[in-house]
């Protein structure tokens, strides 16, 4: 998709009316979301006395609002939820503790993701591990097998979230500075204290059960949504010299076509192309920006069913500029020796 020159000069003007956070809207979203979260713990405890399955059902149903808590953390990190930095930092940390996510560490890593989304040269921070066809072809057997495991759909969704929210976010990252390291320690201590407090009121068995499943289901859904936002057939990838910020947002991020309740539950993050174009837009203004501007309606769209099918995609084909499956790679590899007219594709350095 090529953008018109007039559009390239006007999109910054278009988004200005949507960039301002509303204290009233943010406060209301914070109130109704956290109220539902607190209420779910009381309901889950009563359900736990009856049946583990019933309690598990409460954890599943709670996902209708639980993802919104993460989006509040997300918007605070982008500076788009409250004008006050103190308010953003406070609520970013509160929601971060709920999601077992160090606010300062996550904010820094996610900002890196936004700066380099779709840039082949700058892959590796805050994104899904993606290799080009040539990189995979030139890898040793061990790396190929590991990559296949990491790109296996069940592994991506059900192990990826577990690894991130229960594992890697408990530790320092290489890029962390003193601020991020202190925040990791603070978050870990706060998580323990939260567990002790809830366990003392209820029971440790209940706390461990409900806490694990509400976060595990939530993290799996978070990985699902994040994956389909950037991993689809016509996703945009380019080397640093050819990379373009606007194109990476409009062409490299999906526009999710889903029922309104899904957008409500996920904090409108499905309108990911507009979010990447301007992360200063609060989540409650994203749908309005899309509906009121035709330019924002021309990005790659995905239905929920099409989202499921994207999980078969695994490699980026530089020659044809599209994501392909391992099956397509195997078939093309078998055909290439017979077709001497094909040009040689030069691989990129990871």
Image (tube, grey):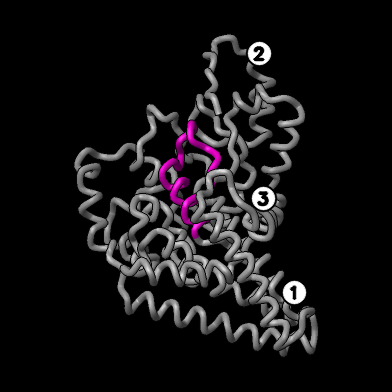
| Separation of marks 2 and 1 at Cα, in angstroms | 56 Å
| Magenta residue span | 104-126
Answer whether residue 178 is magenta in the image: no
Q: Residue at x 58, y 44 (%)?
A: 174
Residue depicted at x 29% and y 51%: 295
Name the quarter where the N terminus is drawn: top left
- Residue 136 image offset from top left, x and y in percent: 64, 28
Q: State the residue position of label 2.
A: 337
CB contact under 8 Å: marks 2 and 1: no
- Which residue is found at the position 64% from the left and 76% from the top? 194
Residue 115 in the image: state x and y as whole percent: 41, 44
Q: Please name whichever residue, 295 or 99, is drawn nearer the observer in this view of the structure.
A: 99
Residue wearing tag 3: 156
Counting from the top left corner in percent of width and height, residue 62 is at: 61, 76
Q: Which mark is residue 79?
A: none
Q: Secondary structure at mark 2?
A: helix
Which of 228 and 209 lies nearest the eye of the viewer?
209
How far apart are labels 2 and 3 at the CA level? 33 Å
């Amino acid at each position: 998709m090529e953008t018109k020159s007039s559009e390239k000069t006007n999109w910054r003007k278009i988004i200005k009316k949507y960039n301002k956070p509303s204290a009233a809207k943010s406060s209301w979203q914070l109130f109704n979301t956290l109220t539902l979260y607190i209420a779910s713990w009381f309901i889950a405890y009563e359900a736990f006395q009856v049946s583990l399955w019933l309690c598990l059902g409460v954890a599943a149903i709670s996902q209708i609002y639980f993802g919104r808590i993460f989006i509040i953390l997300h918007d605070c990190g982008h500076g788009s939820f409250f004008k006050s930095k103190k308010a953003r930092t406070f609520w970013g940390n509160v929601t971060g503790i709920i999601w077992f996510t160090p606010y300062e560490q996550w904010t820094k890593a996610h900002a890196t993701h936004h700066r380099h989304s779709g840039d082949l040269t700058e892959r590796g921070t805050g994104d899904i591990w993606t290799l080009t066809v040539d990189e995979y072809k030139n890898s040793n057997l061990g790396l190929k097998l590991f990559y296949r495991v990491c790109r296996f759909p069940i592994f991506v969704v059900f192990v990826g979230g577990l690894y991130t929210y229960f594992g890697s976010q408990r530790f320092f990252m290489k890029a962390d500075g003193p601020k991020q390291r202190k925040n990791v320690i603070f978050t870990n201590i706060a998580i323990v204290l939260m567990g002790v407090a809830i366990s003392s009121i209820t029971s440790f068995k209940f706390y461990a059960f409900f806490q694990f499943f509400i976060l595990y289901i939530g993290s799996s859904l978070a990985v699902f949504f994040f994956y389909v936002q950037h991993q689809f057939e016509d996703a945009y990838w380019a080397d640093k010299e050819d990379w373009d910020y606007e194109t990476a947002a409009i062409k490299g991020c999906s526009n999710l076509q889903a029922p309104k309740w899904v957008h409500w539950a996920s904090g409108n993050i499905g309108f990911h192309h507009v979010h990447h174009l301007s992360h200063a837009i609060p989540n409650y203004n994203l749908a309005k920006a899309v509906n009121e501007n035709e330019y924002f309606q021309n990005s790659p769209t995905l239905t929920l069913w099409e989202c499921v099918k994207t999980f078969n995609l695994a490699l980026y084909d530089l020659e044809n500029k599209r994501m392909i499956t391992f099956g397509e790679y195997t078939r093309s590899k078998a055909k290439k020796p017979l077709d001497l007219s094909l040009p040689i594709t030069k691989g990129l350095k990871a």
